[in-house]
Amino acid sequence: MTNRKITTKDERATNDDRTGPYTVANLLTCLRIVLTVPFLLLVSKGRFGLALGVFFVASLTDFADGYVARHYQQQSRLGRFLDPLADKLLTTAAFVVMAIPHAEFASIPVWLAAVVVARDVLIGLGSLLVYRITGFREFKPTFLGKLNTFVELGLIVWFLVFHTTGRLIFLLPLMYGIVFVSVVVSGGEYLAQGLRILRKGKPVTEPNALKSSM
């Protein structure tokens, strides 16, 4: 039997501190944040093909920063903060700019963008409330939360593709309904888990706990 060293939470924190903030993984995450600006400008001008290209590059950085962090021991506290922030910044800003009325193309419903943004804000405030009351901080995305992120990203991609090709745009209202259901259901799951943590009144270490999914 081989002996395997078990890394404790304190040791992981020490390793994170030694890694420092200036890593390739964090630079890739920062690049994704920067790419949000040209992406939004291109969408607002109706340049959907170019916007789709920028979105694709941003998606590659999302994969690359996680891969580099895991395989080259570049996990850091800053990275754990920036990565979901970059994801939410890109998706939330995309929904907002796609909801702004444009003469050149049909925008997504304002109510849909409002629901998406409201969910993220409420989950963030709920996480803060849970932390202040119980001290619980091991927030992790739930399955439905991850699914909701996938659905939201899917709508962004297909919105760009449909408007680039000028085809299948009639499918967008159906996709709006799917996103709405996903937002409500996943938000309800986070609410239920947050209430369960509050009822226990102390930190717990469940695998699925309250967090904005990124």
Image (cartoon, rainbow, N blue to C red):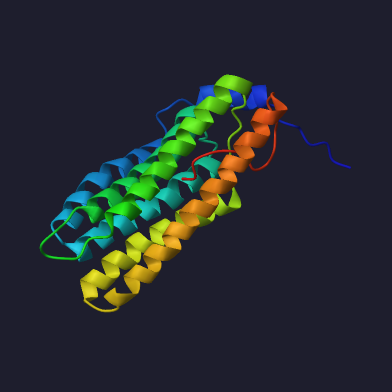
In this image, 41 relative to 144: left or right?
left
Residue lying at 55% horizontally and 43% vertically, measured from the top left? 70
**Residue 134 point in image, percent of width and height:** 63, 22
Above or below, 39 relative to 27: below
- Looking at the figure, which quarter contains the N terminus? top right
Horizontal side, residue 174 vs residue 13: left or right? left
Residue farthest to the left? 103
Would residue 39 appear left or right of 128 to someone viewing this image?
left
Q: Which of the 4 image quarters holds residue 197?
A: top right
Image quadrant assignment for residue 180: bottom left
For the point 50% across and 35% down, the residue is 74
Q: Nearer the viewer, residue 177 or 35?
A: 177
Point out the residue furthest to the front here.
111
Residue 184 x %, y %: 49, 52
The vertical placement of 160 against 40, above or below, is below
Q: Is residue 141 visible?
A: no
x then y, percent, for residue 12 = 62, 27
Farthest residue in the bottom direction?
167
Q: Identify the residue at image location x=69%, y=30%.
A: 199
As rendered, which of 99 and 58 lies closer to the eye?
99
Image point 39% across, 57% down: which residue? 153
Depth order, front residue of 139/63: 139
- Residue 43, how many percent across, how many down? 20, 56
Where 43 sits versus 129, above or below? below
